[in-house]
Image: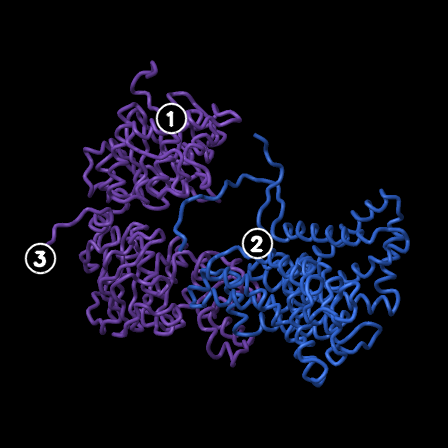
Chain colours: A purple, B blue
Amino acid sequence: MSGESSDTPAVELVDVDKAFYGVKANDQVSFQLARGEVHALLGENGAGKSTLCSILAGLYRPDAGGIFLEGRAVTFKGPKDALQAGIGMVYQHFRLVPNLTVAENFALGHPDVGVRIKQKELYRAAEELGERYGLPIDPSARIWQLSVGEQQRVEILKLLYRDARILILDEPTAVLTPQESKALFKTMRQMAAEGRSVIFVSHKLNEVKQVSDRVTILRDGRVVGEVATRDAEPADLARTMVGRDLELPSRDARTGFGPTVLAVEGLRVQGDRGLEAVCGISFEVRAGEIVGVAGVSGNGQRELAYGLVGLRTPTSGSVALDGVDVTRASVLEHIESGFAYIPQSRLGMGLAPGLTTEENLALKAFRRAPYTKGWRLIAAAFRDEGARQIQQYDIRGVRLGLPIRLLSGGNLQKALVAREVELEPRILIARSPTRGLDVGATQAVRNQILSERDRGAGVLLISEDLDELLALADRILVMYEGEIVGEMPAEEATAERLGLLMAGEREEVSP
Amino acid sequence: MMTRRFIVEPRGLASPRLKLAVPIASVIAALVVGGVFLFITGENPFAVYAKMLDAAFGTGRGFSETLVSATPLILTGVAAAIAFKMLVWNIGGEGQLLMGAVAAAGTAIWLGDGAPAVLLLPAVILAGGIGGAIWAAASAIPRVYLGTNEIITTLMLNFIALNFVNFLIFGSHSPWRDPVVATFPSGRPIAPTARLPEFFNRLDAGIFIAIVIAVAAWYLLEKTRWGFAVRIVGDSSDTARYVGISVPKKILGVFLLSGAAAGFAGGLLVSGPVGALDPRSLDLGIGFTGIIVAALARLNLVAVIPVAILIGALSNAGPSLQAIGVPAATVTMLQGAILIFAVAGEFFVRNRLRRPDRVSEPILEAGEPA
């Protein structure tokens, strides 16, 4: 170890600001990382965790404030500088070359590797490191042959091969099985024992409790708490992370729900990588009821929605709408039987960015009159219906005939929601429908959802925004790792209670 | 680290004027570059261009030949444009044209002299379209159901088609080969009743058929229910899936239509100016030139028509240059230069250059796909 006094932090951020297009992602952030500690960064999506890490890793330069390495001010011009200084990051999306072997990926960008790669030495180094840190890996395997967990191992070993003193792991457990996570925690502890420092980004409380020495909590770009993990109560952490000490919103108690609209029984749906993402979920939504699904993103919400609307065929279980089984129906059959779906990313799925606003408003209804007569499109119907909906739903900034992508986020979402509610669905499934919207647009979208409920549709509101769930939902389910781990009427829900369940803390079952 | 003096950023929306200016500017830029090249090789560029203009449009004969050249180009241009619009990279127009010609000539020979012209002629032309579509299917089906790369398969199938045609004429005594001339093999001439009558020098009604097909393709894509679904797929296949459109079927449909358009070009050549399955008159790179036409027309199916006439004029002017001692390949070079400038110009349609200010990079938060 160096001769510095032991209380000099390994790295320190002082009053760091970082804004993107005027939005502060990091606001006066100060952060200290001690030598030999595992330091958890806790916060909701968009709290600024990734930005903070990216600044440390040299990917972003702070607008203001300083980075101090072992007490000395440093500036990183890029990730290479940071790595040179001993700071390395494992990103959520790996930076590996799929067609190269593990050893070759080790060599990439390494300053000591000359023109000719000494395969044997690399192999030996990779094997030795893997053994030492409990991350066994075959150095001759090509990256594409490896599982996600193994690829992550390669990323970590690559940093250790560069002898990084500070390792930043950005939500590393998101892609791991519980067993793999356990092994990773062991490795993290070992690295800390050797005097390396580890930053562990997570929003899962149990993991933070398990592995870290200290926790820094971020919210809305600011540091809102820093505690030694052993002194921290999960409930306190959850409350600090989510933000407000929410009082129950005063809400008219709704009791008169109609018959069951959507009945889901033992639903299982696979994730993108073939792992089960929805693991046997059962619930019902009644007419005129808003059922909220809380949960940290990536716990199976996307697959649940896909499974419900026909975008992904469930592996088992059943989905019924008004008593009619639609488990294996196509997307079109779902739409025609009364499903409406507001997906999470408007421009990725949901809208056709290059088509006009009026065309986008007709994206689902174009197969019927008035949009079509036989096989012909009726241009006037697009224009007139478009103009009506644009006015009715207060979609601003539209010029007919121009691509919808020119609209602002709020107006894009208003258009998408307009199209979905125009279908007069039996069940409306919405995923984070107000994420990233301003206050006005948020209100407009929420009002649409409420008026669908009043019309007698069932609503399934899948959201990470607890405020939204508490304000709109009649009943809240909590999803964690593909299962429903809690269910409660909205009156009994609090941010703390939901936050704990979302983080995987099981509640005692009360009768 | 070097500081960049300009930032490239996406344009919100390109004005119609810009969209028109870019192809015109790319033609002019190509002519200027070509002029410099001609000047270096000791020619007077103005004289050469004047000669080309005269050869292409100056006389009735020249103008009719320009339209004769433009006819198949309109169709291979449509073939490329309709596919590229949908992000289907069919560069097999060449092979689809040849197989269209095989089918057309085969139909004419098979039905023979006996069939009445009113039936024979449409059958021959239609066979061209079907032949092209079948050849496209050989790439389209693996692309849609197995995810193969259509750039490679369509390209490779071009060579197979060409060798197949050569085999039919040079390598075997197939029904396509003219049995009369034994010294130098050539395609067997089809019956006069299977051919479009010429009405203006060598020009026949093929030009009108090509224009009708181009306009019909535009109508299909812009004005029909099927075309709307196809445009949704072309804009965002995830969104198309989300609104319940069968993406594979639509891609297959567009791919086959694209092949059919190129096949019609072969059919019209056989029933028109060529009159036989003759490799020397069919293997002229018309399929590839169609890609230039489509690019220059900015994938607009109607704009393909004037652009094809322009490129047809260029091709037609080639041979006349030899008369004044300039290589005919000058024209090929000009076509290549036009394509390069058109593609480069596209960059400025989509992006603009801007002086940097103090706006940071966008947030690279990892988000879910949907």
Q: Residue B285: percent from the left, percent from the top?
A: 71, 58
Label 3: state its secondary structure: loop
- Which residue position holds label 3? A511
Q: Amino acid at mark 1?
A: Ala
Q: Amino acid at mark 2?
A: Ile
Q: How many residues crowd mark 1 within 10 Å: few (<14), some (14–19), many (20+)?
A: some
Residue at image position (30%, 25%) is A34
Quadrant in which the C terminus of chain A is drawn? bottom left
Label 2: state its secondary structure: helix
Q: Disc 2 and disc 3: Cα gap in Å?
A: 65 Å
Q: How many residues crowd mark 3 within 10 Å: few (<14), some (14–19), many (20+)?
A: few
- Which residue position holds label 1? A125
Residue B152 - label? 2
Splitting the image into 4 quarters, where does residue B244 fall?
bottom left
- Is B260 rendered above or below residue A487? below
Q: Disc 1 and disc 2: Cα gap in Å?
A: 40 Å
- Is B240 rendered above or below residue A99? below
Q: Residue A212: percent from the left, percent from the top?
A: 25, 33
- From the viewer's perspective, is B193 left or right of B79? right
Residue at image position (46%, 38%) is A100
Mark 3, mark 1: which one is toward the viewer? Answer: 1
* Front-most of residues A475 and A86: A86
Label 1: state its secondary structure: helix
Mark 2, mark 3: which one is toward the viewer? Answer: 2
Residues flagged by tags 2 and 3 on a common chain = no
Residue at image position (78%, 78%) is B197
